[in-house]
Amino acid sequence: MKELFSAFSSAVFFPLISLVLPGLTAISSWYVLMMRSGGLRELVQKNHSETAFVLMLLSIFIGTIIDDLGMRIESYWFDRQRDARTKGLHFAEWWAYLRKPFAIEPSGRRHLRNLVARLKFELGVPVALIVALPGLWLNGATRYRPALGMTAGALLLVAYLLLEAGATHEALGLLRHELLKEGGELLSFPRASACEL
């Protein structure tokens, strides 16, 4: 069992949750919609391996675009809010962190990488769900009430993940702030209260 989980190192896990999972989520309803075509269904049945390969490439492609959109949300929404709240120190700390060489990697860097992966997931999946919803409604086989329930569930998940993304973004900023300290406060700003997160 340990060997199974060791395959999910950060080199594999990070692209899986930041690119592949949002990409598969976004194309899922569209794939089901397109499978209603008899010709495509027959082509897929004759070419299972090729179809899986094409779907994986497509999910990575769409996932990369979704990741770019998530980065836009982060920079235009979360970064600007935090920079205003910290009176310009958020961007100053971000650039200082990128310039700072660490002789010995602090343990906080691993936690920072995990938070970045989580943030990419929390920003990617909402975009993917929004992309997937029209495919659900365009599918004539989908009944109104189940589609309405799935849409409501998806929108609740979008709202929840965006709230979590805000909290993760704040945790990333505080962690970078702490990693920049060398024996004392390098930069200081008032901490956000729980209701501001």
Image (cartoon, rainbow, N blue to C red):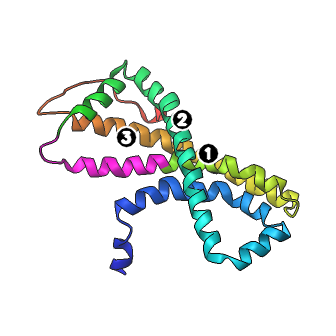
Q: Which residue is mark 1?
A: 127
Q: Residue at x 18, y 48 (%)?
A: 105
* Badge 1 element: helix
Marks 1 and 3 sit apart, C-alpha to C-alpha, by: 22 Å
Give the total of numbered labels.
3
The range drawn in magenta is 102-120
Marks 2 and 1 sit apart, C-alpha to C-alpha, by: 10 Å
The N terminus sits in image quarter? bottom left
Marker disc for residue 171: 3
- Point out residue 189 in the picture as x, y percentages from the top left corner: 31, 23
Cβ atoms at labels 2 and 1 below 8 Å apart: yes
Above or below, 177 against 36 in this view is above
Name the amino acid, label 1: Val
- Point out residue 174 in the picture as x, y percentages from the top left corner: 32, 36
Name the amino acid, label 3: Ala
Which is in the foreground here, disc 1 or disc 3?
A: 1
* Badge 2 element: helix
Marker disc for residue 31: none
Q: Which residue is mark 2?
A: 73
Q: Residue at x 67, y 57 (%)?
A: 27
Upstream in sequence: badge 2 or badge 3: 2
Is the residue marked by circle 2 packed among few (<14), some (14-19), or many (20+) residues within 10 Å?
some
On the picture, is 65 further left or further right than 170?
right
Is the residue marked by circle 1 packed among few (<14), some (14-19), or many (20+) residues within 10 Å?
many
On the picture, is 193 further left or further right than 106?
right
